[in-house]
Amino acid sequence: MNERLLAAIRKEILLFLRDPKSRAMLLMLPVLQVIIFGLAATLDVNNVELAIVNRDSGKWSREFIHRLDAARFVASATHLQSSAELAELIETRQVLLGLVFPADFSRDLAAGSPASVQVLIDGRRANAGQVTASYLGSIAADLGVELDTRQGGAQPPRVESRNWFNTNLNYRWFMVPNLSATMSMMIALLITALSISRERELGTFDQLLVSPSSPLEIILSKTIPAVLAGGVVGMLIVVVAVFGFGIPFRGNFWLFAAAMLPFVFSVVGVGLVISSLVKTQQQAILGLFFTLMPFMLISGFATPVENMPQWLQYVAQISPLKHFLLIVQGSFLKSIPPQDVWSNTWPLFIIAAVTFSSATFFVSRRLQ
Amino acid sequence: MSIEIEIKGVSKRFGAQPALQDIDTRILGGRLTGLVGPDGAGKTTLMRLLASLMVPDEGEVVLCGLDTRSDHVQIRDITGYMPQRFGLYEDLTVMENLRLYSDLRGLDRQANPALFDRLLNFTGLEPFTGRLAGALSGGMKQKLGLACALMARPKVLLLDEPSVGVDPVSRQDLWQMVAELVADGMAVLWSTAYLDEAERCDDVLLLNGGQLVYQGNPRDLTARLQGRSYLLHGTGERRREALSRALQLRSVRDGVIQGSAVRLVLAEGDDAGELGSLAAQYSATLQATQPRFEDAYIDLLGGGPGGSSAIAEKMPALPDSGDVMVRCVKLTKRFGDFTATDSISFDVRQGEILGLLGPNGAGKSTTFKMLCGLLKPSAGSAEVVGLDLLKSPARAKIQLGYMAQKFSLYGLLSVQQNMDFFAGVYGLRRAERKARVGEMIEVFELEDILDQSPEEIPLGFKQRLALACALMHRPKVLFLDEPTSGVDPITRREFWTHITGLVGRGVTVMVTTHFMDEAEYCDRVALVNRARLIALDTPDGLKARVADESLPEPTMEDAFIRLVERQNAMQEQAA
Amino acid sequence: MSRGAGSVRRLLALVRKEFYQVVRDPAAMLIAFVLPPILLFLFAFAVSLDVDDVSVGVALESDSGQARELAAAFAGTRYLRVTPARHRAELEPLLVSGELLAFAVIPADFDARLLDGSGKAAIQIITDASNPNTANFTRGYLQGAFSTWLAGEGLAPPPAITLQQRFWFNPELESKVMLVPGSIAVVMTMIGTLLTALVVSREWERGSMEAIMSTPARMGEIILSKILPYFLLGGLAVAGCVFLAVQVFGVPLQGSFLAIVMLSCVFLFPALGQGLLISTMAKNQFLASQAAVMSGFLPAFLLSGFLFEIQSMPWFIQQITLVIPARYYVSSLQTAFLAGDVWPLYLSDMAKMVVVGLVFFGLTRLKAKEYLD
């Protein structure tokens, strides 16, 4: 490699490591993200507050409530006298849902006829409501089966269900590995998008331009450190996920690492395009913001791509994150085979080629 | 004359660092008071104390009987303050800025039209009332800043370096405006790095290291130098060498190039004997001359730096070929409909210093940027060392060194790392890089500050470092873009010692500047106005062009102003 | 002129200045008028918790008629897109590659298991639990389809206890209906916190703060003048968001527009306070924008309860959410859109926002002095 390029790369790395702001960013971002995404951003449901109106005085409603109190997902169950009170608690968001046992609940069951419980759920929290309702459903079903067997009935056929890859349905096992992709994307984008605008603001960019460095060398000197930083941060999160959170890594690590390279390159290309279009650091941050957010939201980071309308799923194909997330999830939990890694990697090469050639075009245009 | 400002025993510290120590002085109404001193002397801190933006740690500041500690609300009614960089709202138009300040000052709205007319007329901004302040040139921003500060006819006007980065024509306009205000009885404090401005003030306050080292009439200070200033005429091409040798004499306190002559100041109590023999060696004539304020200022602050440049001595002398090193032919740059540079042509020969001068926005920066390859010309060509910057950029660029405004160093890298980077980016291999950087450390005495950031080191060292970085690859041509903007005279002298030394070794220099005393160092000056090259001549030649009976001995500044005004008048007549 | 009148006039002049700056600042316009439609769009379409068209596999390992009928029943179920197979081994790689979210196995001895009567498992459901939330929903769909089939064939007695579920306020269970109101809170946080933080720090950077402080304008007036234009801008942005939400994205508006306006005004109080506090501490735009994104945007996005349940978070993070004004705003906004006006809830949320706002403004006033140092 030539001397000029080496000097520029060395400078870029030193700049980043010596800047207290960048260092803080490097430290703060991963810590914050691991805390927020690893611990807080969960679609698991627990600590549910619910209310009960029990008009029945028999043993079956008591049995139902007893099981409810013992359930892990319930934080507290408030006992109420009337449906009106229940309505108010739901309206003012003090409880997620309420159960109303009719007066003849136990009598009906004792008589061998089906009984029903009314479940009123706050639709403003539809996701938590649905999950909780399914938990309640299994309590009701279990109780119903016991009742039937006690009364001498045959047991109905059941369903055996298995959760592959993540037996305990731990949401963190989904979120934390994703961070290795989003974090390396954020860092790589931030570094590239900010580095040119910072030099431009300080006037040192002119110094680079009057030096014999060619536009390609300048672009490479901005690219290589960002790719390195993105890769290092991504790998760091992998280490934290495996050793800190105890999440299994079942796939082929080297394949995963190899696929990360085109991913980070394609992201850096995007960062270069941003930095060639803006003048100040402030604009660069806004530009980043407007690219990062949509990228993350359409890529299946928080919610699956399959849930989106079909046309938006086509749009999601242009996001490098979308493809790499599949590799991440596959490599951590699923031991994804090489051909599946490849089928998600070649799109990354295409995206990287496109972003890079446009970045080279935009940056060289700015150089004139 | 009333006493408008009293400063009694004022000290101010930032952390443990004293910024001002025990300042006692008075500033009078109806007089223009200049505030001068080297960088970091405490000028801006004093300004802010007077504007009641800060309170002193000890002592008190009293404006028109009001104490800045207790009465800052009333004080802000009677003071006008223009901070550095003018403090304008760049996304408001000229008129909107004026209205804002009028309302903030609680002025009678009925009287606004008349007041604005007067201010706009006064500042010459009438044609631009609808323009955004951010789109104004430096000179116009300065005038608008002044108009805003003047809005409420303050009793005290505080101007913090209003003339940094502003061309001589605009500076003259500003000066005349302020002189009118002073005549009306206003107290004006004007902080400046231009000593020719300070010389024309009624009083000066000279700060050094947070202490007031002189206060009073600048002429009284200048008078102390009576009989110590000399001009050495007739050294011709060898004037730079003569200056360098003169400065090494024990009896010489300070010296600069002044056109074709060398200006020298003797140390106190020394006679001109040594100088006489030097003059004889060059068969030149030594002539006593009137001292200037600048001579006295440098003397008071301990004299100028020595005359030899260690870096120049290390540079291998380039054979004197007399080749054209920089050539531009019909160089033109258009931005949309606007022509920034209109077919400018000139040559710079080896070992020459060419100064590129012109009013703000006249096109000199654009020309300069095309010459060093930062901008692509719309038409015409630019060559460095015979190489076209467009056709073989890398080979051309390796020949040139570049020093940007404000030095443009990497604040986050240490001094050592900055030098390593610039050596590397010019392709020096490991061993060579080590040797060169070591050499720079030695000649610029950077040993003790290698691990510090360029932002923490004194301005003088920062300037040395910037020069070291630009010279790392031993360029044949040096491009200097306002290298000394906002820098105090002593630091600038050291800088020019290096530049003249390098030219002595055959290096070619292109420089832009707003300091007319720096233009005097140039062999030739290219004056650019309204995108055209209007004059290309030696400094003395330019002065001669404007000399007449009313002004038999014009200064460089006079020449600049007159030539620019002459062309403007001609163009307006033609139109 | 009296001091009071002078103060009002200075304030008006500063407000006018601020207004011009906002209108001419592309960043402000971008955040106020381009960001809202983008965000609303993303939350209406991209972020969806509704699992509509689920790709599942059915491995039909039995040749019996009942097994075939069950497989046909799966294939005919709404929401499910079925990939049929003869053996589970064919489906496993598809689960690994992510093409299927789950598959059901109808085993070779299906008929025997069905009639066993001792509660043996008749079929097996295997989910891709790498995304647990999706796995839960998919399993629910498959189980539901199986139960429906059983009941239809008379193979299982009707369940003894049935739950009559009613989802109030959002009977269709569309996630966009609750996400779109929540994203309005994110937009308003950006306007209130990020924009204000940027404008004030820009004044420090350009030195205009120094110039303005040397005039008779008081610090209180300067601070107030920063707030009023952003109130207006926030109001406009909210009106635009509500229009988009209702007219374009089809979110019902059960409550009153007035309530939304009131809530938004109250919310802007702490949001602006936070922005001002950031800008008085970080005097350059770079730091200010970072701080605003870290302390404003991210919490509003992730910790306000519109995407993730606050009650499911660890205890200490729940405590942090207490000082995030967006939390209260989201709660009331979702109510205003979906449930209709519930004033007791509004009042309690507004009171909490005011308290948080008072804290921010109090801190700002302490930090911003009449002097530079």
Image: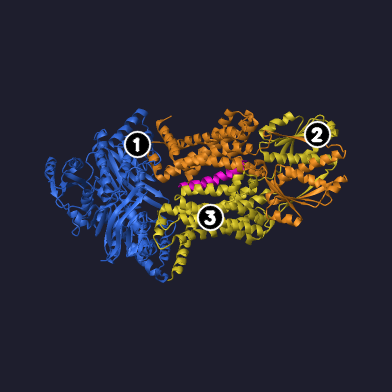
Chain colours: A orange, B blue, C yellow
Assign the C terminus of chain A to one quadrant of the image. top left
- Above or below, comparing residue A251 to residue B158 in the picture: above
Q: Quadrant of residue B371?
A: top left
Residue type for callout 1: Leu
Residue type for callout 2: Ala
Residue sitting at 21 percent across and 51 percent down? B296
Q: Which residue is mark 3?
A: C359
- Above or below, comparing residue B374 to residue B76 in the picture: above
Q: Which residue is mark 2?
A: C122
The chain under label 3 reads C
Instruction: Please name whichever residue, B349 or A83, is drawn nearer the observer in this view of the structure.
Output: A83
What x and y, as percent, mark residue B111? 39, 70
Instruction: Please name whichever residue, A144 or B147, is drawn nearer the observer in this view of the structure.
Output: A144
Residue sitting at 18 percent across and 59 percent down? B549
Residue type for callout 3: Val
Q: Which residue is mark 1?
A: B450
Q: Does residue A292 show up magenta in the picture?
A: yes
Assign the N terminus of chain A to one quadrant of the image. top left
Q: Do the residues indicated by labels 2 and 1 lie within the same chain of the protein?
A: no
User: Disc 1 on helix, strand or loop?
Assistant: loop
Q: Which residues are magenta?
A: A279-301
